[in-house]
Image (cartoon, helix red, strand yellow):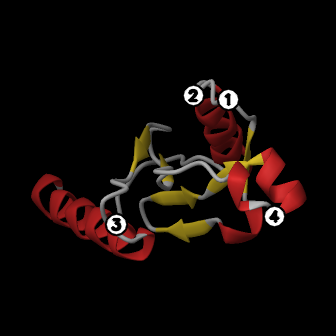
Amino acid sequence: MANQHAETLSKERATEIARKTIDDLKATNPLVILEDKTLEKDFGWVFFYTTKKYQETRDKKYLMPGNSPLIVDRFDGSTHFLPSSLPPGRAVEEYQKAWRSKQKTTN
């Protein structure tokens, strides 16, 4: 089931890609990755993020509504925002299930 690529991204490179991707969102308040929440999966990494102001103050008025986890694919560096309509854990499960299904058809 594992994708047979010769080289995959490191977590450090995936984190750089995730930071650039959330910076490109041009949010009103700067965004930061919650590194202690990052998940490593067979397809890549799942990054969670919030506003820098919320991380510093924990004041709910600085929360960014509707932000959803960001995936960085370990094989090609592509990024994918998960749907915010599902709880994050469920969104990750659905993505992983679809990814595994795709792997079975391409391998």
Identify which amino acid the numbered label 2 is placed on: Leu
How would you rate the neighbour count of disc 3 (Cα within 10 Å): few for under 14, some for 14-19, many for 20 or more?
some
Q: Classify residue 43 as left or right of residue 11.
A: left
Quadrant where the N terminus lies? bottom left
Relative depth, front residue between 105 and 40:
40
Alpha-carbon span between mark 2 and mark 4: 21 Å
Mark positioned earlier in the residue sequence (1 or 3) = 1
Mark positioned earlier in the residue sequence (2 or 3) = 2
Alpha-carbon span between mark 1 and mark 3: 25 Å
Q: Are marks 2 and 3 in contact (CB under 8 Å)?
A: no
Q: Which residue is mark 1?
A: 28
Alpha-carbon span between mark 4 and mark 1: 17 Å
State which quadrant residue 23 falls in. top right
Relative depth, front residue between 92 and 104:
92
Q: Which residue is mark 4?
A: 58
Q: Nearer the viewer, mark 2 or mark 1?
A: 1
Q: Which residue is mark 2?
A: 25
State which quadrant residue 27 falls in. top right
How would you rate the neighbour count of disc 4 (Cα within 10 Å): few for under 14, some for 14-19, many for 20 or more?
few
Q: Are marks 2 and 1 in contact (CB under 8 Å)?
A: no
State which quadrant residue 17 falls in. top right
Alpha-carbon span between mark 2 and mark 1: 9 Å
